[in-house]
Image (cartoon, rainbow, N blue to C red):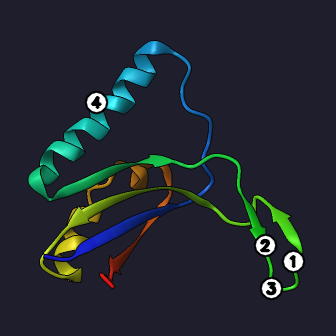
Amino acid sequence: MPNYVLTYHGEAGPMPTDPAAMEAVMEEWGAWYGSIGDALVDGGAPFGESASIGPDGSSTANPASLSGYTIIKADNLSSASAVAKSCPVLKNGHTVQISQSIDM
């Protein structure tokens, strides 16, 4: 069964500092991970500061809205997409890109 990388795209706001709000966010993610079950390969992580290096060596700070990732196993792209449709980041206006990881 192939791996699929779910990448999250959108402006990543600050994580909540209020303990109750943080716990609610973590519970939401925990429930989603639980729904994935054994197909969860890597729960991933949010991304922070970033930079982009161009072919000419130029650098751009915070070039894109890539905000995190998760890796799952799925039978095919359609199955991986079904899992992505319930990802908690969608509630924050983010999008999820699903990409098959090809073993080499």
Residue bearing mark 3: 55
Residue for point 88% across, 84% down: 56
How far is the residue under mark 3 from the one under mark 1?
A: 5 Å
Amino acid of disc 2: Ile
How far is the residue under mark 4 from the one under mark 3?
A: 42 Å
Amino acid of disc 1: Gly
Residue for point 36% across, 21% down: 23
Amino acid of disc 3: Pro
Classify mark 3: helix, strand or loop.
Answer: loop
Instruction: Decide: is 35 above or below 20.
Output: below
Upstream in the sequence, badge 4 or badge 3? 4
Q: Is residue 61 left or right of residue 47?
A: right
Residue bearing mark 1: 57
Q: Quadrant of residue 90?
A: bottom left
Residue bearing mark 2: 53
Q: Measuring from the top left, give residue 32's x and y in whole percent.
A: 23, 46
4 or 3: mark nearer the eye = 3
How far is the residue under mark 2 from the one under mark 1?
A: 6 Å
Upstream in the sequence, badge 2 or badge 4? 4
Considering the image in quadrants, where does the C terminus appear? bottom left
Residue for point 62% across, 35% down: 14
Whether label 2 touches label 1, CB < 8 Å = yes
Neighbour class for label 2 at 10 Å: few (<14), some, many (≥20)?
Answer: few
Instruction: Decide: is 88 above or below 77.
Output: above
How far is the residue under mark 2 from the one under mark 3?
A: 7 Å
Q: Nearer the viewer, residue 102 or 74?
A: 102
Neighbour class for label 1 at 10 Å: few (<14), some, many (≥20)?
Answer: few
Neighbour class for label 3 at 10 Å: few (<14), some, many (≥20)?
Answer: few
Q: Which mark is residue 27?
A: 4
User: In the image as oriented, which residue stretches furthest toward the top?
Assistant: 19
Q: Is residue 30 left or right of residue 17?
A: left
